[in-house]
Image (cartoon, rainbow, N blue to C red):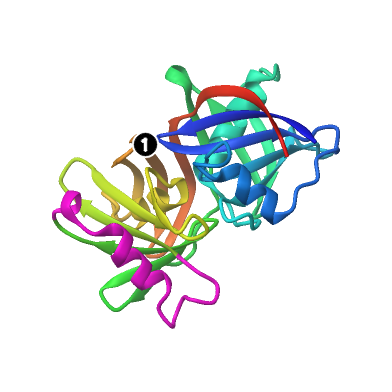
Amino acid sequence: MLLTFYKYQGTGNDFIILDNSQNDIYLDAKQIHHLCDRRFGIGADGLMLRNNKEGYDFEMIYYNADGNESSLCGNGGRCMVRFVYDLGLHKNKFRFLAIDGEHEATIEDRDWVHLKMKDVIAIQKYNSDFIINTGSPHYVKSVSLLNDFDVVNKGKEIRYSDEFAEDGINVNFVEENTKELFVRTYERGVEDETLSCGTGVTAAALVFPHNDNGFNRIEIETPGGHLAVEYDKTGEEKYENIWLCGPAIFVFKGEIKI
C-alpha cells in the first residue's frame, strides 16, 4: 500500500497526518509504530487520521508512537486543524470530534492555532505533586533547575510506578518563575521526553494559576518552543474556557510504501 502522508509539528511535537476522508486507510499497531520510528520509518511522536464525521468539520483519531490509539493530544489537535485548513477548508472557527468529545478551534496570526479544551473540575493532590486529566492523564511535579533535570529516568520512574504502571500517565516537570512556566514532559506511548506536550502544558498551567479567581493567561516555554494557556478559574477547583494556544507548522509531504 502506498500512503501519502503529511508531517506537521507544534513546538517540536511532531505528527504524521493521513487524510482518511475516503475511509480507505486501515493500519494496525505494528504498521503505525513502524511509520513513527525515527530510523526505519518517517519519524514522529504520533500519527493521526483525519476522518469525516457528520455534523463536524472532521474527526481526529490519534495514535501514540507505540501504535496504540490514545487519549487526546492537544498539539496534535492544533496541527490537525492547520492541516484541514491547508487542504482548503478556510473557516474562522472549526468544530471537530476527538476521543474525549467535541472541540472548537480558531487560527490566528503567525500560524497560531487556539484549541478549546474540556473543562476541568478538580485537581488531585498526590503527596506534594498533582494529578489532573486535561483530555489525557497528567502528573505534575514542581522542580528547580529544570534544564539539568533527568526527565527521562525520573519520568519513567513515576510512569511505571505501581500506582500508574497499568494505564500509564504522562509526567510533567515544571519550573515556575514570575513571568512564565518552563515545562518538560515524559510521555507515555512515546516512552521518552518529547519537545512539547499540549495537554501537559495545559495541566501545568492549571496547577500554577496567576489568579485564584478569574481570567488567567499562562506563558509557557518548552524545549520545542513557546505556548500559552488561557482559562477562567471560576471556583476553588473549577476551570472553564480553557484554550491551548501555539504554532502549528507544516513540515513536509511525502509518500511511503508499507
Q: Does the magenta run of residues contain 153?
A: yes
Asked whether residue 93 is in view, the answer is no
Instruction: Check the image and name the residue furthest to the bottom.
Output: 162
Residue positioned 74% across, 36% down in the render? 58
Looking at the picture, how far across and down is residue 224, in whole percent? 34, 37
- Position of residue 101 relative to residue 217, above or below, is below
| Nearest the eye: 235 or 94 | 94
Q: Is residue 134 above or below residue 35?
A: below
Residue numbers of the magenta segment = 145-169
What amino acid type should be assigned to the residue bearing mark 1?
Leu
- Whether residue 183 sits left or right of residue 234 in the image: it is left
Residue 132 image point, x, y percent: 44, 64
Q: Is residue 110 magenta?
A: no
Q: Residues within 10 Å of mark 1 (few under 14, many from 20)?
A: many
Where, quadrant-wise, is the C terminus in this rendering? top right
Secondary structure under badge 1? Answer: strand
Q: Measuring 70% from the left and 34% from the top, which residue is drawn there? A: 18
Q: Is residue 120 above or below residue 105?
A: below
- Where is residue 144 shown, x and y percent of the image? 15, 57
Tell me residue 99's x, y (percent).
67, 53
Residue 50 shown left or right of residue 196 in the figure: right
**Residue occupied by mark 1:** 227
User: In the orientation shown, which residue stands out farthest toward the front?
Assistant: 40
Residue 50 appears in which quarter of the rendering? top right
Q: Name the residue rendered at 35%, 74% in the picture.
A: 125
